[in-house]
Image (tube, coloured by chain):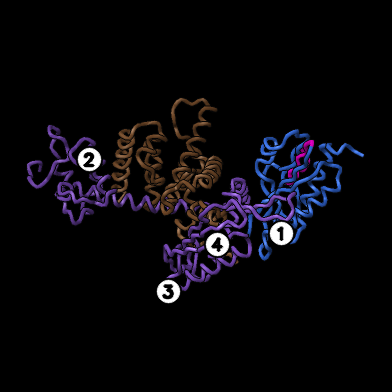
Amino acid sequence: MAVDLSGAADGVLATRAAEGDERAFEVLLRRHLGLMTAYATRLTRSRADASDAVQEASVVIWRELPRLQTPDAVRGWMMTIVSRKAYDLIRSRRVADDVDELEVPSQSGAVDDPERVAASTDAMGALRGALARLPASQREVWTLREVGGESYADIAERTGTSVTAVRGLLARARETLTREMEAWR
Amino acid sequence: MSDDPTRTPLTPAGAAPSDPAVDPPLDPLDPAGVDPAAELEVVDDGPISMERLSDYLDAGREPYDPEIESDPSALAQLAALARLRSMTAGLVAEDAAAEPAPDPSWIAGVMSRVRLESRTGREIPLSSPDPRSTLHVTEGAVRSLIREAGDSVPGAVVISCGIVGDVDRPDAVVGVEVAISALFGTTVPDVADAVREAVAAHLAAQTELVVEAVDVTVRDVHLLDTDGGL
Amino acid sequence: MADPLDDDRLSLLAAELGALAAACPGVQRVQARPGFGSLVRQAVEGLGAVVGGGPGGGADASSSAAALEGGRPVPLVGVAVAEAETRVTLDIAVGEGAQGPAVAREVAARLLERVAAEPLPPASVDVRIVGLT
C-alpha cells in the first residue's frame, strides 16, 4: 500500500517528483491546479486558453523540476512557468489576429465578469470591480505581481517593458485600488 | 496646516499647500479615522511615494524607517496598502477555490505526457545466462523501489534517494543514500534503522547490486495532518 | 511462404512478442523503448526492416499495442532485421511481489524461443526493466 502523500509538504513532493516520482507530481499538480488555472484565466481572459496554458506548463514543470534549486519554493516557481506559457499563448493568438498592442482581451466568463462582480456586495466584490476598471496595462502588471508573485524583472520580460515601467504601473494600480477600497469603506 | 512642523508634506515643494478641510490631522494609531471620502494624497515623485511605501511594506517594514513611521499620511497609506494586500490574498484564494475540480481526462492527458519523459537515469546491467539476452534495470526503477521501501516503514516518508558509485556491472558495489522525513513523536533512530533495513532488503530481492551501505538521513520531521498539508 | 522480411508479417510478429511478454508472470506492463528506431539504425549494419518500438508510452499487460498509426496498431516491441541478426527490444514494468531479474530473464527466454521459430537471422533480445513497484 503506497504511503499517503496528500499531506506531504510542497518541498517533499517537488524533490520526489524531480527524482521521477510521478505520483508525487500528480499530488503536487492537483494541490496547486486551482491557483494556476485562476492565474492563467486572469492572464489569458479565456477558460479554454487557460486550460491549454496550464497543461503545457504542467509538462514543462515536470521536465524542469530537476533544475529547481529550492524545492520548498516550488509553488511560486510553477506560477512563473504558468505565466510564461500563458504569454506564449497570448502572443501566438496575437500574431494570428494581427493585433498591434499587447492588449489582454476581455471575455465573459472570465474571473471578473460583470455578473460575478455585481453578485457580491461585499468588499471582495468592490475589489473585483475596482480591478475590472483598471486600465489593462495596470491590471496586467498587478496580476503578475499580486497573483503570480513574480519578480519585477520577470514581469518586465513578460510585458516587454522595463522594471521602471513595471514599478510605475504597479504604483498607479495600487494608488487607484487603495483609494477605491478606502472610499468603499 | 502646511506650516505644521510635525507633518511632512506629501506634495512636492511649490505645489498648492494641503487643504485642511481635506486633510484633517491624523492619529497614527487610528488611521481609520481618516474621512473615507478624502483623497489620499500620494504623488509618484514626492518624498514618500507609493512605490517607496509598497517596497517598505513588502520588506515587512524593516529596516525601520523613521521618516515613514512618523508621518501620519504615510502610515495611513501603509495601512490602506496592508488592507489591500490582505484583501488581494483573499481574492486569490477565493478564485483558486472556485476553480472546478479538474476533468479526470485532463489530468490523465498531462500524466500520459509526463510518462513519456520518465527519468530513467543510468542503465544497470543484470546478469544473463544466455549471451543472446541483454538485460538491464533502470536507475529510475531502482530509485522508485528505494522510495517504496522507505515509505513502507510506518512514520517515514522518503524525500530523496540516490545510488552512489558506478553501476557498469551486475554485481557493482554501490552505496545508497536516503533522506527521509520522520513523523513527530516516533523514535527517530528506530525509524531510520527500519528504513535502512527495508531498503537493503528490497534491493537485495530486486537487483543484483552489492549494497555496501545504506545511509539514512532524517532531514525533516512532519506532523500527521488529516486535513492535508504537513 | 511470405517473405520473412515483409513488414506486415514482422509487425504481426512484434505484436505477438508483446503479447507473449505481457503474459509472463510478474510483467505488469510492456512499453516501447524510446528512441528504438534511431538507436537500431545507428547500431546495426545492413539493416533491412524495422518495425515496432511504438510512438512511446505503455500499455497494460492486457494489450500489447500502443497508439494507432494509420488505423493500425503500432507494436510496442521493436524488431529490427539485418543481414546477420535480428534484434528484439522492449521495456517492461515488473509488478509487486515479482522478482525483477528473474522476470526479465523469463521474458527474454520466451521471446527468443518464439523468434527462433521464424525464418529470420539469429536473434538477440534486449529487455529493460523500467518499473519495479
Q: Residue C64 carries which label?
A: none
Q: Which residue is drawn at 68% across and 37% down?
A: C43
The location of residue B188, given as percent across then percent down, is: 43, 71
Q: Name the residue under label 1.
A: C103
**Residue at disc 3, secondary structure:** loop
Q: Residues within 10 Å of mark 1 (few under 14, many from 20)?
A: many
The chain ID associated with circle 2 is B
Mark 3 and mark 4 in contact (Cβ < 8 Å)? no
- Tally of numbered discs: 4
Q: Do labels 4 and 2 share a chain?
A: yes
Foreground: B126 or B141? B126
Q: Position of residue A179 (x, y in %)?
A: 28, 44
Name the spot of residue B170 as percent of width and height, x first. Answer: 62, 55
Front position in the image: C130 or B122: B122
Q: Is residue C106 above or below residue C5?
A: below
Q: Which chain carries label 4?
A: B
Q: Would you say the magenta stretch is mainly helix, strand or loop?
A: strand
How far apart, in angstroms, are the residues tagged by discs 2 and 3? 51 Å
Dots 4, 2 in contact, CB < 8 A: no
Q: Do labels 1 and 2 touch, CB within 8 Å?
A: no
Q: Earlier in the sequence, mark 2 or mark 3?
A: 2
Tag 4 residue:
B211
Q: Which of marks 4 and 2 is nearer the N terminus?
A: 2
| Separation of residues labelled 1 and 3 (CA atoms) | 41 Å
Residue occupied by mark 3:
B185
Label 2 packing within 10 angstroms: few (<14), some (14-19), many (20+): some
Helix, strand or loop under label 4:
strand
Q: Give the range drawn in magenta.
A: C70-83
Q: Mark 2 points at which residue?
A: B49
Q: Residue at x 30, y 34 (%)?
A: A164
Letter of the brown chain = A
* Of labels 4 and 2, the one closer to you: 4
